[in-house]
Amino acid sequence: MNATEHTLKKKRTFVPEDFKVSDWATLQPFFESLNARNIASAAELLQWFKDRSELESVLEEDMGWRYIRMTCDTANKELTDSFNYFVSEIQPNMAPYSNDLDKKALESPYLKDVQETGFDIVAKLLEKEFKIYRAENIPLFTEIEQEAHQFGAISGAMTVVLDEKELTLPQAADYLQKSDRAVREVAYRAINARRNVEKEKLNNLYSKLITLRHQAAVNAGFANYRDYMFEALGRFDYNVQDCINFHHAIEKEVMPVMNDLAKARKEHLKLENLRPWDLAVNYNGTQPLKPFENGEELLEKTIVCFSKINPYLGACLTTMKNLGHLDLVSRKDKAPGGYNYPLDETGVPFIFMNATTSLRDLVTMVHEGGHALHSFVTKDLAMNTFKHPTSEVAELASMSMELISMEYWDVFFRDEKELKRAKKEHLESIIQTLPWVATIDKFQHWVYENPTHTLEEREQHWVAIFQQFSNTITDWQDLEAYRAISWQKQLHLFEVPFYYIEYAIAQLGAIAVWKNYKKDPKKGFADYLAALKLGYTKPIKEIYKTAGIKFDFSQAYIHELIAFVREEMEKVG
């Protein structure tokens, strides 16, 4: 821990400053102290909550670093063992104590008298956690977490050889943007052939996770894991039927646009048949956009871009840089994907991603930068709970930043033609995001409503859902086997089930934030920042209202926002 980090941390008042998480025996007294404390007033209850929050922050930051280090080097057994120790030895012992503490708080006669902003949210979350807690699920959740992270190890070890170079799959994916169609096809087939090697392993892993998750749901009194997760995720503002309606709305409103885009792509590329390896290349057949050369340049340019929006944003990334809280570049044995990991005690998050040199990497960087901003502006909130808003709000922060930052992408693209191309490609990808989210979400609904399905049934239903939300122009002849396993690349299915529809909800919100920003940048950004600063002290609808937008994913709203995006695409030219 360096001096800079110490200055950023709040002074501990309950856990000793020199305390480090090592084993359960040293942690247990803190939980016992909270459980045994006599609470005789609303003020004492509030202090009890703050002490509990401090303990949670210490534990969550320790867990965070174990996860970060493991994902940065999945081949390092010591790092994996450290993470697994926390999951298998510390978390299971914490769980019953946490449940006792929830009960103590809920039974306190002073809970209703705590008037601080956000405590109505705290009470709802306590009730939710107490409702779903079952002691018999503790070992199940330990096993689930350990199994789920095998996905990262399996995926991180996948490489292919192109141009006589061993490449990670994210690095190889850059070849799908090459103007030479033959090169794209070779890359596409190599990537998917490599994935196909792991088909059985990932199918078996997913089947095991489904079985374990279904058992946990049944133990907690739910018919299936889908229903359990709606409760566990605290989806107080919408329900299963709303999601089903959303799937229908995407099919009706977005799929015709997807077909139009696919037709335009086919015509511009002058192709007889549009194939899957033609879907990432630029219309004009030019080389892939290259907004940066390496991780250092990506970071420096993002700092400049963010500073143009508001100097505070650039300062946040600079702080992360100074503390070494970024790992940006793809390499072998690094877990796939990207994330911003909030570090609750320090208040400075960690950004992890697998950059090569693509536009997609730029988008990922500004996306995670939006999450990082959210972490910075909520770090001083009174309760640990307040720093962790729902995913619908968290993803609003990141997806809005993608679009707001786009106004300053001249930092990455000095050439006007390339800048216009980058904006158009990103806006097209936003439209494409909505059907893919619907695909993954609908697939999960089916998977967990039918937990005893066969592998053949899983494949059949995946393909049917995939086709429902895919354009009708792309020719999949002789690639059916690759299409059938395309779900296996989605980390969320393995590691964070049902955390996906939030992307679509937040994407709609982000379009609305951007629309406001384009009308009035100063007010648009101020409203966006005000919403982020609320953390989770208000319900989702109030946070969206603070941002100057609606919490709405109806067909009519989707129609309105997609029309706006298409207008902006036409303006770009």
Image (cartoon, rainbow, N blue to C red):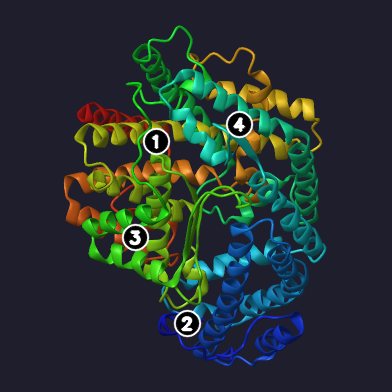
Give percent across and percent down for residue 365: 41, 51
- Quick one: 11 or 242, which is closer to the camera? 11
Mark 2 to mark 1 CA distance (whole Å): 40 Å
Residue at image mark 4: 191
Residue at image mark 3: 531
Query: Tag 4 or tag 2, which sits nearer the N-term?
Result: 2
Residue at image mark 1: 430
Q: Nearer the viewer, mark 2 or mark 3?
A: 2
Q: Nearer the viewer, mark 1 or mark 4?
A: 4
Residue at 43% x, 39% y is 553
Element carrying mark 1: helix
Mark 2 to mark 4 CA distance (whole Å): 42 Å
Q: Are marks 2 and 3 in contact (CB under 8 Å)?
A: no
Q: Nearer the viewer, mark 1 or mark 3?
A: 1
Q: Quadrant of residue 37?
A: bottom right
Q: Which mark is residue 2?
A: 2
Element carrying mark 4: helix
Mark 1 to mark 3 CA distance (whole Å): 22 Å
